[in-house]
Image (cartoon, rainbow, N blue to C red):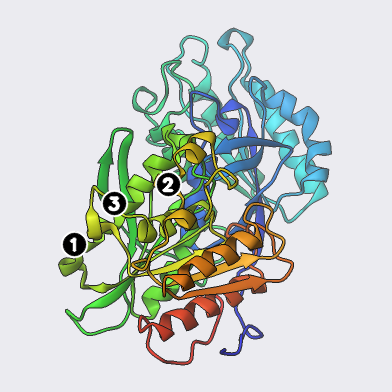
Amino acid sequence: MAQDKTANENVPKRFTIMGLGDSITEGGDNFESYLFPLWEKLFTAGYSFEFIGPRSSKCRIGTLNHCGFSGKNAEFLDRCIDSIYRKYPADIVLLHAGHNHFNTENPVPGIIRAQESIIRKIQTINPDAKILVAQVIPSGKLPKYSYLPELNKRIADMVGNMHNPNVVLVNQAHYFDWEKCTIADKVHPNKAGSAKMAEEWFDGLVQILAKPVHSFHPEIIRYKQADQGDLSLHIFKPEKGGKGEKQPAIVYFFGGGWALGTPLQFYRECAWYASKGMVAVTAEYRISYLHHTSPFESLDDARDAIAWLRKHAEELNIDTSRIVAAGASAGGHLAAATGIIHSTKNGSLSRPNLLVLYYPVIDNGPEGYGSEEMKKRYTEISPLHNVDRTSPPALFVLGTKDPLVPVKSAEEFQKRMNTNGVECDLHLMEGAGHPIFYYAKPLTSDFYTIRQMTDDFLVRHGYLGNEENNNLKQ
């Protein structure tokens, strides 16, 4: 195994962000917060960061922390911020506050005093804190919010008069069309509105942050139009290989219990294997949090993703004899199922040639893992119960302390593969749990250990050149 060379890495500095505001920061059951689209932008740009705060809101990757209080105003935030910021001393604060008053209150002077006090209290605790102050999004709820234009002018004057390089004005009202960007209440952002807010915050942040060493630039292509909306593949083109030369491909399926997750989970791996000459793909599929679907629809999407790659192999220069399905946890289950369970819909088009499985849910039988519906229909969806001599060779990585996937299930899977004359390279990582590492947190040595295992497996099967793979961090 190649040496893990990490001593001289240029590891990006990790920073913390606190979203500070009201329900527009917090989000709600029927409207969007800017938090997750901003998370996506920062992650894709290659920043190392974490959202912090005393509260949390659900999103497709689980939850994101913040300091948004629905129904509260700037004066409330001023009363709370000293104790909150001492407990959550974020490097960067995103302040968006000004709603939750009536125009009849003549609220602008009080809001400005509260914002000035908030900024002063934060910088007393942490003089190096960067505070991005928003001119707030407009609203069509009139006459209640008819004071917002005046407020935004006063916010700009306030920030300008501070002459403080650590206090930065962000114009969230800039091109924010409440008719297109809010829900029916004319106040709270819809999906387009939250994306617009995230874009403005991001533009402000890049002005004060050091440029990351690495960023990600996939081509995003729709591969399927499901009943619940479009599904996309995030494709990383190979960085080497002759023009027109057929390249192996690897397609990743994210983890999250078929309920949560994002294709961004495998951006690092895709960038790595694209740099090695592979067409590397991370796939969107339906999940219950967004689409109210079951694992059966998730598997249908995974099969369609692989079939799409085969159908478009010529234009992508993919060698159809060397397609890998990979994934983690529930995504590992999908990868395994595409290779092992025969499909009546797509036939061989949806089957990969090789499997890379990170702590996959492999047993959905009566004694295995999954919903009652999965256990009732396990013959349709459980990889363990469908192994045969046509199953692709597999790399299987599992922690010995995994609470969801027993070691005995992995060993039984390996036994059934071997009995059918199929290779299953099982690696048990002592003391590791589930997941073995977190893609949204600082990477541990386990990430690089697993990547080296994957490199070695791909080299052995002719998907990577037999070169020295120095595991430099990306």
Is 378 on the left or on the right of 105, as rendered? left
Q: Nearer the viewer, mark 3 or mark 1?
A: 3
Decide: few, some or many residues near mark 3? Use Cα within 10 Å; few <14, some 14-19, many ≥20. some
Camera-nearest label, 1 or 2: 2
List the residue tagged with mark 1.
312
Task: Give how far across and how far down residue 131 sits, in percent.
Answer: 65, 46
- Measure how far apart labels 2 and 3 are at the Cα level: 12 Å
At label 1, which amino acid type do we have?
His
Q: Residue placed at 68% from the left, 33% from the top? A: 115
Picture coordinates of residue 341 (x, y %)?
36, 55
Q: CA distance from mark 3 to mark 1?
A: 19 Å
Q: Nearer the viewer, residue 342 or 110?
A: 342
Q: Which x, y percent locates residue 14?
A: 65, 62
Amino acid type for the residue under numbered disc 2: Thr
Q: Residue 69 in the image: x percent, y percent? A: 67, 27
Q: Please tell me whether mark 2 or mark 3 is closer to you in this view.
A: 2
What number is the disc on residue 343?
Answer: 3
Q: Earlier in the sequence, mark 1 or mark 2?
A: 1
Q: Dot 2 lies on which element? A: helix
The CA distance from mark 1 to mark 2 is 30 Å
77, 166: nearer the viewer = 77
**Disc 2: CA contacts within 10 A as few (<14), some (14-19) or many (>=20):** some
Q: Is residue 291 above or below residue 430?
A: above
Q: Quadrant of residue 435?
A: bottom right
**Quarter of the figure with residue 119:** top right
Residue 379 got which mark? 2
Whichever of labels 2 and 3 marks the residue nearer the N terminus, that label is 3
Q: Is residue 468 left or right of residue 391?
A: right
Instruction: Confirm or deny contact between disc 2 and disc 3 (CB under 8 A).
Output: no
